Image (spheres, rainbow, N blue to C red):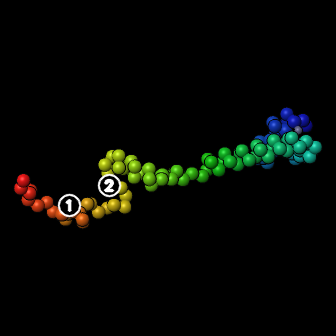
């Protein structure tokens, strides 16, 4: 078995689909050929990562709260956390109620 055949049989080997004789020749070549071992390991890792990416639904990216507030401020909506509307019945503290205009 040569390196070309290793790459051909690699998927079958990882899936345990090789017959015992081919598997033995495959492993015999791996014992003598470090580049093929490295190739198999990188291939195995890529397959595993691909399966994980396919099976596991990644959580949605976390949106920073500052961005939400900036968007809501731009659209004029109330930012989250400020459920109470501004109280307009009372004047803001520190300011005097409007009095009669002073005569000149
Ligand atoms: Zn090889």
* Camera sees residue 83: yes
Could you say where residue 13 lies in the image, as x and y percent from the top left? Answer: 81, 45
Q: Residue furthest left?
A: 103
Q: Which residue is mark 1?
A: 88
Residue ID at (32%, 55%): 78
Could you say where residue 69 lies in the image, as x and y percent from the top left? Answer: 39, 52
**Ligand 1, image quadrant it occupies:** top right
Q: Which of disc 1 and disc 2 is earlier in sequence?
A: 2
Q: Which residue is mark 2?
A: 78
Left or right: 101 as drawn, with respect to 49: left
Could you say where residue 37 lies in the image, as x and y percent from the top left? Answer: 85, 44
- In this view, the residue in front, 53 or 70, is 70
Give the numbered dot on residue 96.
Answer: none
Query: Disc 2 vs disc 1: Cβ atoms closer than 8 Å?
Result: no
Residue 93 sits in quarter = bottom left
* Camera sees residue 12: no
- In this view, the residue in front, 90 or 63, is 90
Mark nearest the camera among 2 and 1 is: 1
Could you say where residue 70 lies in the image, as x and y percent from the top left? Answer: 40, 49
Name the element at disc 1: loop
In whole angstroms, how far apart are the C-alphas of marks 2 and 1? Answer: 16 Å
């Amino acid at each position: 078995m040569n390196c070309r055949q290793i790459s051909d049989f690699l998927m079958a080997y990882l899936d345990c689909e090789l017959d015992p004789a081919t598997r033995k020749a495959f492993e015999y070549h791996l014992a003598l050929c470090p580049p093929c071992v490295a190739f198999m390991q990188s291939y195995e890792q890529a397959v595993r990562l691909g399966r994980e990416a396919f099976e596991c639904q990644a959580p949605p990216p976390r949106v920073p709260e500052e961005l939400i507030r900036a968007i809501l401020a731009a659209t004029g909506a109330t930012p989250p956390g400020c459920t109470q509307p501004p109280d307009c019945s009372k004047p803001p503290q520190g300011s005097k109620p409007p009095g009669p205009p002073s005569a000149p």
